[in-house]
Image (cartoon, rainbow, N blue to C red):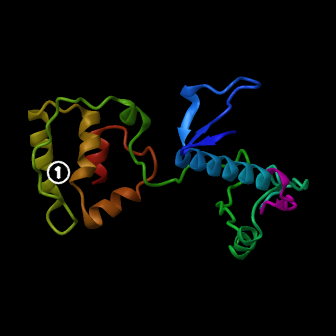
Amino acid sequence: MDTTNSELQVDIGQGSSPNPEQTLPSQRVEDLQAEIERLRAHIRSTTEAPQSPPVPLPTFYGSTGLPGSSNDHRNGIPAATEAAARDVPPVVPHFEELPPAGTFSQPSTGRPLALAILNEPYPGNIHIPNLPEYNGTTDPEYHLSSFEILMPLIGASDATMCKIFPATHGGDARRWYSQLRNGIINNFTEFSTLF
């Protein structure tokens, strides 16, 4: 390279002759040379630096994540990260103990409406009128008769009445309903008799 009057000619081709268009101010050339040297040093440091041995991944169930897996998987995790992972207690999933297969059954209480009632579609056009909540402290006959008078006025079927009636219960009345045997109520007449 030749330097003349604060300008430098840079040969960018192999064996090509300098060209006036390839002439750059000296400061710009120095900046580019410094950048090239910095990049070369970076490349050397990343390719020539000794690699630290891989650190094993902290696992709870071996490398596959499955219980009983014993093969050890290694990865390049810094030692500080591995130490921090060892200090964290393992998360052990908690599963409720289930009965053996074939013996599982639903609770015997809490769903007193029969399947025929539950399976009947609820009409979307029914608007439930405001009914006072029955909590067991007032007259149950009065509450029942008020309900039976209002429901036909809104076009509620027998099954719909069975579905709506528990929503008018609170307190002790709601507890009473939740303790009824599953499937005991087949129609509103049975429901009102139990009530």
**Residue 65 showing in the rendered view:** no
Quarter of the view holding residue 89: bottom right
The reply, left or right, for residue 60 in relation to residue 29 is right
**Amino acid type, mark 1:** Leu
Between 139 and 131, the one nearer to me in the picture: 131
Please provide percent x and percent y for residue 47: 81, 50
Please name the residue shown 69% across and 39% down the image.
1
Residue reaching furthest to the bottom: 87
Which secondary structure, mark 1? helix
Q: Residues within 10 Å of mark 1 (few under 14, many from 20)?
A: some
Q: Quadrant of the C terminus?
A: bottom left
Q: Evaluate whether residue 130 shows in this view.
A: yes
Question: Which residue is nearer to you in this view: 164 or 71?
Answer: 71
Tell which residue pokes out farthest to the right in this image.
71
Image-based side of 30 in relation to 187, left or right: right
User: Which region of the structure is painted magenta?
Assistant: 47-58
In which image quadrant can residue 84 be found? bottom right
Using the image as rendered, state which of residue 91 and residue 190 is in the foreground: 91
Residue 161 left/right relative to 12:
left
Placement of 101 over or under 136, stated as above or below: above
Look at the image and say whether residue 155 sits in the magenta stretch. Answer: no
Q: Position of residue 92 (x, y in %)?
A: 69, 65
Q: Position of residue 179 (x, y in %)?
A: 41, 59
* Disc 1 target residue: 144
Q: Residue at x 43, y 36 (%)?
A: 115
184 to 98, vertically: above or below: above
Magenta stretch, main secondary structure, is: loop
Q: Residue at x 11, y 33 (%)?
A: 154
Report x, y in % for residue 176. 34, 61
The correct choice, above or below, for 150 with respect to 193 in the image is above
Magenta highlight on residue 51: yes
